[in-house]
Image (tube, grey):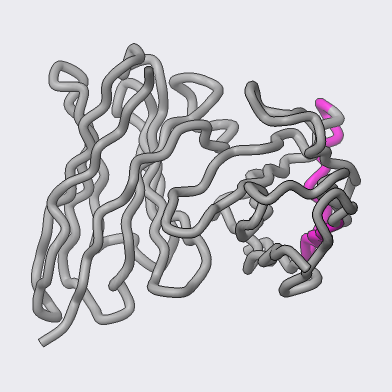
Amino acid sequence: DIVMTQSPDSLAVSLGERATINCKSSQSILYTSDNNNYLAWYQQRPGQPPRLLIYWASTRESGVPDRFSGSGSGTDFTLTISSLQAEDVAVYYCQQYYNPPLTFGPGTKVDIK
Amino acid sequence: EVQLLESGGGLVQPGGSLRLSCAASGFTFSSYAMTWVRQAPGKGLEWVSSISGGGAGTYYPDSVNGRFTISRDNSKNTLYLHMNSLRADDTAVYYCAKYLTGESVNHPFFDCWGQGTLVTVSS
């Protein structure tokens, strides 16, 4: 199974400041035949189901604010919130879909400083 | 508006069985693969099962393979999860979710999620 790790476990950022979350896979999730990274990011606000933010590592889902961006390739990926808003307080998960079983990272909790 | 509504959760004894349902609306149900993902209390997300749009393809991780069965009734726009031989570590909120990409399970990322239904396995 592909193991996903995330860092940090949690972070507190001032409103309007940048938040950066890292995700690492235990093997490359870049599919060379289509040159896509098989990685998604989800946001889970307290008491809510997950919400898809990013797929193919950097494609923003419809309706997701452009302050959210994804980057990276191979085994190392980053979710960036360029200007943190109060409604961004949540746990963020990465997920690989390169190989079954689908696996998620352990989550990164983002709070307001 | 896409809506997914899970039901069927509850308290069950170890070794027992339960069937979860997920009623879908707002989209052409048969055109999309579907999945179940669970979340133990205070923990992260774990994929449980997926099914193709037509229902012919079903997929499970080792942790539930042989105990859980995913199915769908496209005439009723409903997804199911039949759970047998339940264990304490199956205790979780179970979410159904819709594949973004269509009826194939090839690209499993999920754009719409239900609110979840809680399954508690305890004596």
Q: Residue B14: give x, y in percent of width and height.
A: 14, 80
Q: Position of residue A95 (x, y in %)?
A: 64, 51
B71 drawn magenta: no
Q: Which residue: 66% across, 38% down?
A: A53
Report the front residue among A40 and B116: B116
Q: Nearer the viewer, residue A47 or A24?
A: A47
Residue B70 x/y as whole percent: 26, 44
Quadrant of the drawing holding the C terminus of chain A:
bottom right
Q: Is residue A47 above or below residue B81?
A: below
Q: Which residue is at a point 31% across and 21% down the rendered structure image?
A: B54
Q: Residue at x 28, y 72 (%)?
A: B91
Question: Residue A75's image quarter?
Answer: bottom right
Q: Is residue B56 visible?
A: yes
Taking the view exactly as shown, the residue that stands out farthest to the bottom is B123
| A63 left or right, relative to B94 | right
Q: Name the image quarter holding residue B51.
A: top left
| Range covered by the magenta-colored residues | A20-34
The N terminus of chain A is located in which quarter? Answer: bottom right
On screen, residue A104 above or below A5: above
